[in-house]
Amino acid sequence: AQSVAQPEDQVNVAEGNPLTVKCTYSVSGNPYLFWYVQYPNRGLQFLLKYITGDNLVKGSYGFEAEFNKSQTSFHLKKPSALVSDSALYFCAVRDMIEEGKLIFGQGTTLQVKP
Amino acid sequence: NAGVTQTPKFQVLKTGQSMTLQCAQDMNHEYMSWYRQDPGMGLRLIHYSVGAGITDQGEVPNGYNVSRSTTEDFPLRLLSAAPSQTSVYFCASSYSRTSQLFFGEGSRLTVL
């Protein structure tokens, strides 16, 4: 069965500094990986995905993520954080065998301070 | 475009009552899912469907039933509500296994 781990409950970063939100996964076959963001009292919004191809994928709002197969990781990154990036971030994985199941991590709260 | 529509947005139940959370999407998506969100536990998959007439259990299916008689609708039924089912529930849909999920705005359920 697939699983996702986000090892940090909260990440704090100063505005203008680079940020990284970590994610590791476990699947039976090849993974389909996603990042979503949730603002207070809202549903989740899609940021980016990795299906195949380039290990570095670019998404919305200047975010990018690096797929590392050997480390089974898919960390979310941004070169320069904004206060408005403060939100709850979720990593999710779907595998090719149980393709209907998209499993989410516990979530990481990103706090960007001015 | 309506997207994914969930109703009701808020509901208070007494222990033992039953209810149905409605979910409808107008994007002709094959994949639909129900999640619950609890503090510190992320989103946990309750049930999912890969097409009309096909449903399967997720991570936390106990106490919930689903059906998928049409492509558009995927209702979630609580058979006998318990306080442990107090949560925020999200319905989501996607076109395919490689495409993004579109989420509803959520339904906040309190069971007393």
Image: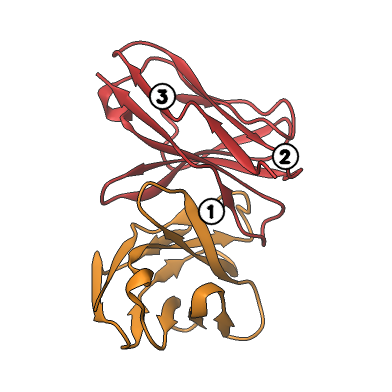
Chain coloured red in the rendered structure:
B
Q: How is the image coloured?
A: by chain
Q: Nearer the viewer, residue B26 or B112?
A: B26
Residue at 57 percent of width and 81 percent of height: A57
Mark 2 Cα-neighbour bin, 10 Å: few <14, some 14–19, many ≥20: some
Are circles 1 and 2 on residues that touch, CB within 8 Å?
Answer: no
Callout 2 secondary element? loop
Dot label at residue A102: 1
The amino acid sitting under disc 2 is Asp
Q: Is residue B81 above or below residue A67?
A: above
Q: List x then y, in percent, for residue B42.
A: 35, 52
Q: Chain of mark 2?
A: B
Task: From the viewer's perspective, tell me whether residue A18 is left or right of residue A65.
Answer: left
Dot label at residue B35: none
Q: Quadrant of residue A73?
A: bottom left
Mark 1 vs mark 2, foreground winner is 2
Chain A drawn colour? orange
Q: List x then y, in percent, for residue B79.
A: 44, 16
Are circles 3 and 1 on residues that touch, CB within 8 Å?
Answer: no
Q: If you read the primary sequence from the N terminus, does the residue marked by circle 3 or circle 2 appear first?
A: 2
Gap between marks 3 and 2 measured at Cα: 28 Å
Gap between marks 1 and 2 measured at Cα: 21 Å
Q: How many marks?
A: 3
The amino acid sitting under disc 1 is Leu
Q: Which residue is mark 3?
A: B63
The amino acid sitting under disc 3 is Gly
